[in-house]
Image (cartoon, grey):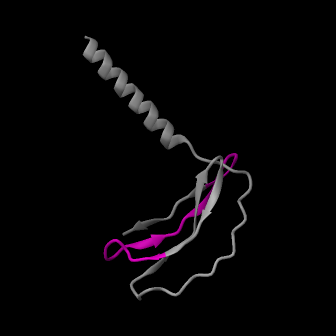
């Protein structure tokens, strides 16, 4: 009985933690200013520009510069990150590779 209770408690905690980590978004009222960047030349024709990103840190977003990268496998494309409107502000949706 004690093991069953412990197992149920762990399951409940993991569901709660998983739900909270997915549900938390950093919503902001105004976008941070975009820094001026200069894109270097690509290292090869296979490389694609993995655009600039914003990472949530300390209650705000921090700019993370873009870079050249080779696709992880043939037939995939880089989908750039973008700002998405929420009821009380905006949130950054990170870029990703997609087939």
**Is residue 88 rendered to the left or right of residue 78?**
right
Quadrant assignment, res 7: top left
Which percent across, then down, holds residue 51?
Answer: 54, 72
Which percent across, then down, holds residue 88?
Answer: 70, 46
**Is residue 56 rendered to the left or right of residue 89?**
left
Q: Which residues are magenta?
A: 68-91
In which quadrant is the N terminus drawn? top left
Q: Is residue 15 above or below residue 45?
A: above
Quadrant assignment, res 24: top right
What residue is rendered at 51% in x and 74% in y? 67
Q: Is residue 55 magenta?
A: no
Q: Is residue 88 above or below residue 79?
A: above
Is residue 50 visible in the rendered structure shown here? Answer: no
What residue is rendered at 39% in x and 84% in y? 46
What residue is rendered at 42% in x and 82% in y? 47
Which percent across, then down, holds residue 25?
Answer: 58, 46
Q: Is residue 81 magenta?
A: yes
What residue is rendered at 31% in x and 77% in y? 74
In which quadrant is the C terminus drawn? bottom left
Which percent across, then down, holds residue 92?
Answer: 59, 57
């Amino acid at each position: 009985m004690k093991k069953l209770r412990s197992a149920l408690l762990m399951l409940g905690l993991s569901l709660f933690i998983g739900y909270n980590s997915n549900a938390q978004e950093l919503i902001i009222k105004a976008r941070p200013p975009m820094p001026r960047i200069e894109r270097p030349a690509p290292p090869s024709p296979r490389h694609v520009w993995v655009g600039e990103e914003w990472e949530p840190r300390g209650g705000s977003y921090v700019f993370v510069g873009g870079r050249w990268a080779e696709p992880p496998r043939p037939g995939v494309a880089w989908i750039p990150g973008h700002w998405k409107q929420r009821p009380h502000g905006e949130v950054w949706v990170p870029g990703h590779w997609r087939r």
